[in-house]
Image (cartoon, grey):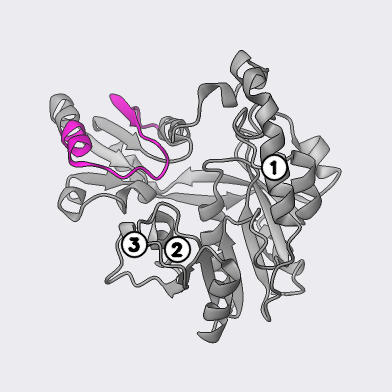
Amino acid sequence: MISPSFWYPSKNSFMAALLSPFENITAYVTRRRLQKRGWKASVPVICCGNLTVGGSGKTTIALALGRFCLQYHIQPAFLTRGYGRKNRKKTPFQVDLKKHSVEVVGDEALLLAQVAPTWVCADRAKAAQAAIQHGAELLIMDDGFQNPTLYQDLPLLIIDGIAGFGNGHLLPAGPLREPIQSGIRRAKAIIMIGEDRHHLFPELASKLPVFYAFLKMNPEIKKLATKKVVAFAGIGRPEKFFQSLHDAGVYPVQTVAFPDHYNYRSRDLAKLAAVAFHHQAVLLTTPKDYVRLPSTFKKYVTFVDVTLQWQNPNAVSDLMAFLGLKL
């Protein structure tokens, strides 16, 4: 789905006020779910989660942590529910890049599996057990902050500095999955990505350690600065991708936004191809969108990746110290 526009203005709106009575249902359901006690793994478990619906950078942080572990010869494994997959298999299975498609495992799982073993299952405890049996020395959950099936040694809250907590309301009146204060109480640290436009740092830093990071387009983006580009994205906040292109000096002649985890259909691809042909432009998208495209269409599309840059170069080492790992 594409996030409703009334979710993100900092001021209240008519629609948010109209839907606010239903927030109590979301709060109640989440509170009951979190009362369950999760299985405690024999290896450390890091959760990259958030309080809002949509993209905040969880997968990017998970990938950064996974690469960091590999540098220090710690074998990580990623755990994901495989959002958007059509395969409803309830037992955990490892992603095989040679045979699994986005329909089977979801887009995020395909990106994670390029870095380290990735296990797909809605029950994170079952996935953790399978990963440990196959040699995992540290587990990284991509999402799952509100999933109680697996005990989290290091629950991290990922916050998009530009979007913040939206209008501060719970679903469906706003983007929050649970009340802000209850989430902060369970977290051990916060990672804020991008500019703190809502001035959340003073209050958050009084309660938890806050680590800053920024997303920077990889150097190959410079090759597109002199070309006509049609940019499209089906992520949590497509406008964030489009703004990143502007920040990198690439100004699309047209942008096309799709719902998060969108399953591209033939007619969508035909329209994109027609738009690109009309402008004599390059089709450009995100890595997460690229893996969802049919192989026959990928040759007509370019994707650009991002690099995570920490304000404090020792940020990841400091995060690992929460687990008692001195690297």
Location of residue 4 in the rendering, given as x and y in whole percent from the top left corner = 51, 26
> Which residue in the protein does label 3 denote?
104
Q: Quadrant of residue 34?
A: bottom right
| Residue at mark 2 to residue at mark 1: CA–CA distance | 26 Å
Which contiguous range is marked in magenta? 249-273
Mark 2 or mark 1: name the one nearer the start of the chain. Answer: 2
> Which residue in the protein does label 2 denote?
112
On the rendered image, what quadrant is the N terminus found in?
top left
**Residue 153: in magenta span:** no
Whether tag 3 and tag 2 are in contact, CB under 8 A, the answer is no
Please tell me whether mark 3 or mark 2 is closer to you in this view: 3
**Residue 143 in view, yes or no:** yes
> Which residue in the protein does label 1 denote?
178
Q: Amino acid at mark 1?
A: Glu
Q: Amino acid at mark 2?
A: Leu
Q: Dot 1 surroundings within 10 Å: few (below 14), some, or many (20 or more)?
A: many
Vertical relation: 146 (above or below) 203? below
Q: Amino acid at mark 3?
A: Val
Mark 3 or mark 1: name the one nearer the start of the chain. Answer: 3
Is 73 left or right of 186, judged from the image as shown?
left
Q: Secondary structure at mark 2?
A: helix
Location of residue 15 in the rendering, given as x and y in whole percent from the top left corner = 59, 18
Q: Quadrant of residue 195?
A: top right
**Residue 67 in view, yes or no:** no
Q: Residue at x 27, y 71 (%)?
A: 99
